[in-house]
Amino acid sequence: MNDLLRNRIERVRATLRADPNGIVIGDLPAGCSAIPAPLQQYQQLAEFLRLTDGARCGGFDFLALEDLDRVQYVTDSLPGGRQRWLAFGQALYVPLLLDRTTQLVHEADQDNPEEVGRCFGTFDDLLERIFGSGYREALRIEDDGWYQLLRFLEMA
């Protein structure tokens, strides 16, 4: 994660905490200091978990570290199953998946649970969208509170 992205996340966190209604828009709780060894190989995801664990960013929800194991069933029907895919969150209730081999992020295919949908690039590429001008396109929406916050902070 580059410094610009880290600074954006910290600015959003500070703004959300300062606003009594911030929790409605999103939440960037404290991160985890101890990332389990199997997850450390996914460097960008592990770095994000160290920064914030269980983040809610508008329409994007990231699972807390303690919840990752219980949702891996969503990868069972995909080619390669749990060996290949790691479910780590959702975008408007559509599971987000990390390809353990390529470390690229995909969304699940809503119409076919045996396929993956569009690719967001690396985990940091996804974060760049969520904390920047690509948020609306990534979520396929026109506007929401998170986007308004990004505009207020001149990030979108």
Image (cartoon, rainbow, N blue to C red):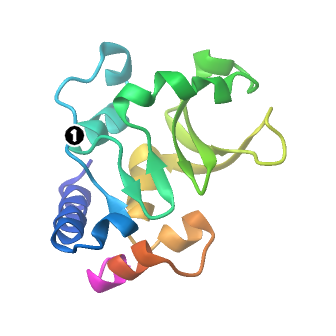
Q: Is residue 7 left or right of residue 27?
A: left
The magenta stretch is 150-156
- Amino acid bearing label 1: Gly
Any part of residue 101 in sight: no
Pick whichever, 124 or 90, lies toward us. 90
Direction front: furthest residue: 20
Q: Is 41 placed left or right of 3 in the picture?
A: right
Q: Is residue 40 above or below residue 97?
A: above
The answer to if 153 sits in the magenta stretch is yes
The residue at the point 51 percent across, 62 percent down is 59
Which residue shows up at 78% across the image and 36% down it? 115
Image quadrant occupied by the C terminus: bottom left
Where residue 139 appears, as percent x and y from the top left, is: 58, 65
Instruction: Inspect this view and state whether residue 80 appears.
Output: yes
Indicate the position of residue 23 as horizontal and vertical percent values: 32, 64
114 magenta-colored: no
Residue 104 at what x, y percent from top left?
A: 53, 39
Residue at image x 31%, y 57%? 27
Which of the two residues, 14 or 42, is positioned nearer the viewer here? Answer: 14
Q: Quadrant of residue 155?
A: bottom left
| Relative to 121, 1 lies left or right | left
Q: Viewer-proximal residue, 111 or 22?
A: 22
Look at 37% across and 22% down and name the residue there: 39
Residue occupied by mark 1:
31
Q: Position of residue 130 (x, y in %)?
A: 42, 62
Q: Residues within 10 Å of mark 1 (few under 14, many from 20)?
A: some
Residue extending furthest toward the right: 111
Question: Which quadrant of the structure image shows residue 153?
Answer: bottom left
Which type of secondary structure does the marked residue at label 1 adopt?
A: loop
Figure quadrant of residue 17: bottom left
